Image (spheres, rainbow, N blue to C red):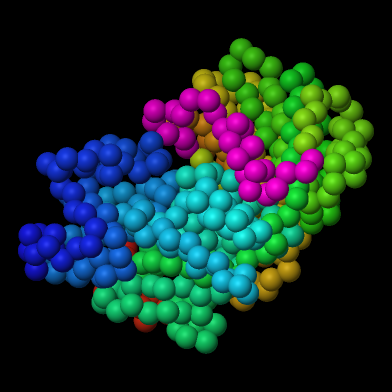
Amino acid sequence: MNLAGLREKLDGELFVPESPGYEAVRRPTNPGYRDVHPGLVIRCGSVADVALGLGYARDTGIPIVPRGGGHCFAGRSSTDGIVLDLAGIDTISVADDGLATIGAGACLAQVYAALHVHGRTIPAGCGASVGIAGLTLGGGIGLLGRKYGLTCDRLVGARVVLADGRIVDCDADREPELFWALRGAGGGQFGVVTSLIFDTVPEPMTTRFELRWSRASVEEMVATWRRWAPGTPDEVPADLTVIAERGEPPQAMLFGASLREEAPTRELLQEFCNVAGASPEVDVRGGLAYHHLKNSFEDLAPREEPVSGLRIRSEFFTRPMRLSTIDALLSMLINGEATGRRQLTFTALGGAYNRVPDTATAFVHRRELFILEHIAEAPSAWVDRSWEVAHVDGSGGVYPNFPDPQLDDWATAYHAGNYPRLAAAKRAYDPDRLFEFPQSI
C-alpha cells in the first residue's frame, strides 16, 4: 500500500512535512523532543486507523511509535519515522457498575472531568495533559495511590492492536499474559493500546495542603520527612520538594492531599512541623472534590517551561536515606556549581502500592518507601552527580514511567525478576520487534 492508498482508507488524517497543520501535530508535549521531525504523522480516528498505520510500517520498514500525551522523558513517542497520534481516540463512557472505558488518546483532564459527572475517579497523576494510556502502562503513581494503588492496579481490560494488525481484547481471562504485561512494563512494548477499562472508585472529598519554608534547615526538613511521611495513614500522601537557585536561599515545600477532613489533617501536619522545628507558610483547603483538587495543583508547576526541557533521573528507596547521604545530597544541591533551578522531589509510597505481590502485575516495585527525583533544566551534569550521591542508599529500582537512558542495567532496574516473563510475552506478541526502541524489552 502506498501513501495515497493509506490516506484514502483512513478515518483520521495523515500529515507529511508539507501538510498544513504538520507543525502543530508533530510536536510532543515534552519540549526536549520538539526538534524531532517525523516523516509521517497519522492522526488516528479509529482503531482501524491504528491497524492501517502498523501495516504501512511493516510494509515499508519505517519505524513507528504510538503517542498519547507525548510526555515521555526518553522521547519514546517521538521518531523521524511514523507517529501514530491517538488523540482522536479519546471517548470515555461509564457503566452503571462503575467500569469506565477510556480511549487511549484521552488526557487526565478529560478523564477526571468525565468521571466526576458520575461521582467516580481513578488513582492517577496530576498533569492535566498527561495521557492516560502511557501513565497506566508504566504503573501510575498519584495522590490516591497509597489508598487505592497504582493506576494499572485498577485496570481490568484493554483493547490492543498487535504488530501483525490483529485487534484483541485482553483481561484476566482473555490473553492473560498480555494483560499481565500491560500493567506496569511501559507503553509501546507489545502493541498499541487503543482503549482501557478501569474499575473506578467513588470520587472522594479531599483536603489540599501546601506548606512552604523559605528560611529553614532543609537538612532537617528532609531528615524529618524520611521518618514521618512513609508512615502516615494511607489517606494522607505528603511529598517534599527542595528547590535551589544560585544566589537564593533554598526553599522546601510539603504538599499533598488528605482524604480526611480539614481539622484532623491540620493536626497531622502539625506533627511534622513540631518535629521539623520551623514554622512554614500554611495553605490548607478542605472540602475539595478530587476533580477540583487536581486542577488546584497546576499552580505548583513552573511558571515558564524550559525551552530545552528538563533532565530528570530518579530511583526507588526501600529504606530511609542515611543522614550522611542527606547532608552530601543537599550540600551539592545548595552549594554546587550548577546554575539555574535545581530540584529534589521525594514522593512517599507504601500503603496500597505495597500490598500487591511483586509478580501479580508487571510492575515489580512493591516494597519501596519512596522515590527521589533529581530535576534540572537540560543539559545539566548536576543531575548525574546528585543521582550518584543518592544512589548509594537506593534500591536500584527505577519507575518505568521515568525512563533513564543512563542506566547500565535497565532490565533489572525497571523490571527485576519479572523481566524473563516480559521477554516471553514480547516474543509471543511482537516476535519481529516492530515496537523497538532503546531499552525496549
**Residue 294 is covered by the magenta coloring:** yes
Is 412 placed left or right of 207 in the picture? left
Is 85 placed left or right of 58 in the picture? right
Whole-percent x and y of residue 327? Answer: 73, 32
As rendered, which of 86 and 414 lies closer to the eye? Answer: 86
Whole-percent x and y of residue 116? Answer: 61, 54
Whole-percent x and y of residue 339? Answer: 52, 20
Residue numbers of the magenta segment: 286-311
Q: Compared to 260, does 433 lie above or below?
A: below
Q: Compared to 376, does 399 lie above or below?
A: below
Q: Residue at x 41, y 73 (%)?
A: 159
As rendered, which of 352 and 343 lies closer to the eye? Answer: 352
When asked about the image quadrant of residue 335, the answer is top right
- Residue 343 in view (yes/no): no
Is 314 placed left or right of 221 in the picture? left
**Residue 140 is covered by the magenta coloring:** no
User: Which quarter of the rendering shows the N terminus?
Assistant: bottom left
Q: Compared to 140, does 180 lie above or below?
A: below
As rendered, which of 38 and 258 lies closer to the eye? Answer: 258
Q: Residue at x 29, y 73 (%)?
A: 163
Q: Compared to 53, does 87 lie above or below?
A: above
Q: Residue at x 39, y 30 (%)?
A: 308
User: Which quarter of the rendering shows the C terminus?
Assistant: bottom left
When asked about the image quadrant of residue 268, the answer is top right
- Residue 309 in view (yes/no): yes
As rendered, which of 142 and 374 lies closer to the eye? Answer: 142
Q: Residue at x 48, y 62 (%)?
A: 92
Whole-percent x and y of residue 226? Answer: 78, 44
